[in-house]
Structures are given as C-alpha cells and as structure tokens.
Image (cartoon, rainbow, N blue to C red):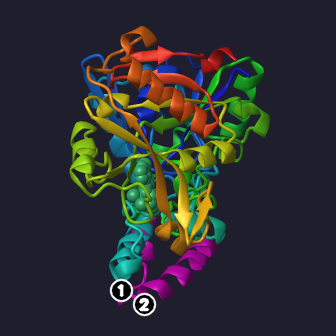
Amino acid sequence: MANVTVIGAQWGDEGKGKIVDWLAARADAVVRFQGGHNAGHTLVVGEKVYKLSLLPSGIVTGTLSIIGNGVVLDPWHLKAEIEKLEGQGVVINTENFAIAENCPLILSVHRELDVMREAAAGSGKIGTTGRGIGPAYEDKVGRRAIRVCDLAHLDALEAQLDRLCAHHDALRAGFGQPPVDREALLNELREIAPSVLQYAQPVWKRLNSVKKAGARILFEGAQGVLLDVDHGTYPFVTSSNTVSGTAASGSGLGPSATGFVLGIVKAYTTRVGSGPFPTELEDETGQRLGERGHEFGTVTGRKRRCGWFDAVLVRQSCAISGVTGIALTKVDVLDGLEKVKICTGYRLNGKVLDYFPAHAADQANVEPIYEEMDGWQGTTAGARSWADLPAQAIKYIQRVQELIETPVALVSTSPEREDTILVRDPFAD
Ligand code: IMP
C-alpha cells in the first residue's frame, strides 16, 4: 500500500494544502483527479506562500505533477497559474508536469452560464465559485465537451461545435443572451492550444508505468466529501465526485492503486456557499472561530460559515470514502475556549438519528445533539509531539477519533510543514 489518497472529509477547506505538500515531498508523483480551479490550496514553504487552484501541489517541489481526466480544465487559468508560479521561481516543464489528453475544457460559455444561472436562481442559489465547473461537467456527461486532445484537431471541430452550440444557444436565448460566437471561440482555442498541448499525453499510461516502476503516488482530492455530487448535501454540492473512489476513475489507474485513504478533518466545521450546516454558530463563538482560523475562501475571498465539530458528518464521510486514518487540522483555533462542543447525533421530528439524512429539507431541519467538554488554556499551536499538547486538547482529539470511528494518523498544529504530530505514516503502510 505505497500510495496515498488525500480527501477532504467535510465541506472543503480542511487544510489539505499543507498535508498534501508535506506528503508530496516524499511522493514520486502527485495527481489531481477531480474538480477544477474551484479548489484553493495555500502552501507555506519556509518564507514563501504559494496559492494553487488547479495545479497539483507537487509542482512546488518539482515532483511529477499530473492533471487527470477527472478534472475540468480552464486553459486560460492554467496558463495564468503557471506564469504566476514561474514568477515565484517554480520550474514547470514537460518532465515534471502532464495533463490528461481526455480532460474536458472549461470554456467562456461555461463561466457565463454558471454566473447567469446563479443570478437567476434566487433562493435556490448554490453559491458556486462562478468558475464554470458545473456547466463544464454537464457538457462532459452530455457528450458535447471539447477536450484537451481536441486542441490538436481544431480544424475538425465542426460536429462537436454543432452539438455544443445547439445546447448552449438554447440556454443562452432563455437568459436573453446572444448565441455563442463560434468564430471567436475557435480563435480563443487556437491561441491557447499550444500552452496546453505541450503537456498533453495519455496520463493513464504514464501513471501505469510509474506505478509499475514502484513509484509512490499521491492522489490529491479537492473540495470535500460533503460536497460530493452523490453523497454530499445535494443540491448544494459541487459537480464532481469528491470521494476517494474517484482517484481511480479520474486518473486511469484501478481502484487498488488508491492505497492509504487520508481524510483531512478540521477540528471544527466550516462551509462556503449555501446549504445545510447543522452545527453552524451565528454568534460570537462562530465569529471567533472565523477570525482565529482566518476563514475566508482562497478562491472567492468569501467569509466561511463556522460551527462546532460534527462527528456524525465526519463519521459518515469516513465510512463513504473508506478513510484509513485522518489528519486533524487547526486544533489551535479552539485554544482558550472555556467549553467546546461536539455534535454526536441529530434530532428530527422527535426521532434521534445517528446519520445525516439525504433529503434537503431533513438536512436543513435536523437539530444537533451536543456533548460538551472542558476546553483548554495554553496553546496547541506549533506542537510536534503529544507531550507538547495540553491534556484536555488530547482528550478532545481522542474523543473525536472515537466518535468518528477512524484513527488519527496526523495532527497538524500550524500552517508550517514541520508543525505536525505524526501518529502513523500513510506512506509506510
Ligand atoms: P462549484 O464547485 O463552483 O460549482 O461550487 C459548488 C459548491 O461547492 C459551492 O458551495 C462552493 O462554495 C463549494 N466549493 C467548490 N470548491 C470548493 C473548495 O475548494 N472549498 C470549499 N468549497 C468549495
């Protein structure tokens, strides 16, 4: 089990960036397998801060970094992100970076549709990142996507453009927008094609050969299980499968390659955008968590909603994603609180539930059942061993582990790479 799959076990923003970076330093290849540039990963390496949305985190350390077929790729964003990182001294070339040739593209029509739909949705608004993710996935499944490999055959795009435009022109007419300008779209694609094509290849083949050669592969998930299009808080979800199983289909390796599944879990809960959030705190404590945790979206800058740790949700995420062990992050944000609460079940229509129901109205109406614990004084920030933690903080972590029925593999105690308590090395399994 030499490979590791990292996924978020809540609504994203669990602190995956640092953990992935920490693991990437020991991996031979890092693979993104779903989502797009809606993700936001902040990596702090020494004095330098890198902000990634689309590129795999391994890129910063020069590790082979791969964008798998399960990702939706905005070529203009890709170019800008590469240029930004190169400006920070990161080397990106065809040796250390590859894009799946069967990866669908996010086009301007997708971005426009995302924004128009959200504006028209009123109270049904999802609160998307506005980056065209949903519409691009719809076109992939609707068999009208333009993919990376098409960029090498732009003169033979007629039939695909017919399919794409027939769909989008009808939608655009409904929004009072002019039809797609096919010529402008083709010109845009012609201009951007070389920037993408230089990295395009059958990555399933490259991954299978590095795997055969004994490489340690790190699969880097984006968003979180509760935003999964099947298992999340539908319809307030993203449009991809964010669970660990997608690492296989979104990269072109079989399910046995996923290895140790590391679920990233924040010591409290946050969510950006609309949708149910049973333990949300709209009071001073919620405000305090947001301020101490710097809870603002990396991609959109939106303020994140904050609340107590929800053990029911995380237990469910860990079960659905087959999590082997968790990395618990941001415990230090709870430092100094007199009391801390953990949600251990829900009440719904007089019944007690030990799981999160599927129906949106039930999800909105469940009332959390809390267990209250004493908080801790002193700080957990920067701790590198259990001995550095206040006893009550250890009790909290142990209780979390018990309630989610999944062991703690790592505890991250600051954004710095080395501020980590290692209980079980995922790569050593
Ligand atoms: P979309 O992925 O842009 O379609 O947005 C759908 C939902 O997923 C919205 O609630 C977004 O706020 C949320 N979302 C998408 N990407 C992330 C992420 O990386 N972290 C947290 N939330 C995200």
What main secondary structure does the magenta stretch of the protein show? helix
> Up-down: is 419 above or below 132?
above
Q: Which residue is mark 1?
A: 177
Which residue is nearer to you in this view: 209 or 368? 368
Instruction: Determine which quarter of the picture holds residue 86.
Output: top left
Asked whether residue 167 is drawn in magenta, I would say: yes
Residue 152, can we see it?
A: yes
Q: Which mark is residue 173?
A: 2
Q: Dot 1 surroundings within 10 Å: few (below 14), some, or many (20 or more)?
A: few
> Up-down: is 413 above or below 418?
below
Task: From the viewer's perspective, tell me whether residue 383 is left or right of residue 402.
Answer: left
Q: Position of residue 128 (x, y in %)?
A: 40, 63
Q: Position of residue 416 (x, y in %)?
A: 33, 20
Label 1 within 8 A of ligand 1 by Cβ: no
Q: Kindly state the secondary structure of the residue where label 2 is placed.
A: helix
Identity of the amino acid at label 2?
Answer: Ala
Residue at horizontal 54%, vertical 58%?
346
Q: What range is drawn magenta here?
A: 158-186
Instruction: Determine which quarter of the picture holds residue 108.
Output: bottom left
Task: From the viewer's perspective, tell me whether residue 134 is left or right of residue 51.
Answer: right
Find ligand 1 in the image and state its quadrant: bottom left
Q: Which mark is residue 73?
A: none
Residue at horizontal 38%, vertical 87%?
175
Task: Tell me how far mark 2 sits from mark 1, CA to CA.
Answer: 5 Å
> Up-down: is 402 above or below 371?
above
For the C terminus, give its image quadrant. top right
Residue 189, can we see it?
A: no
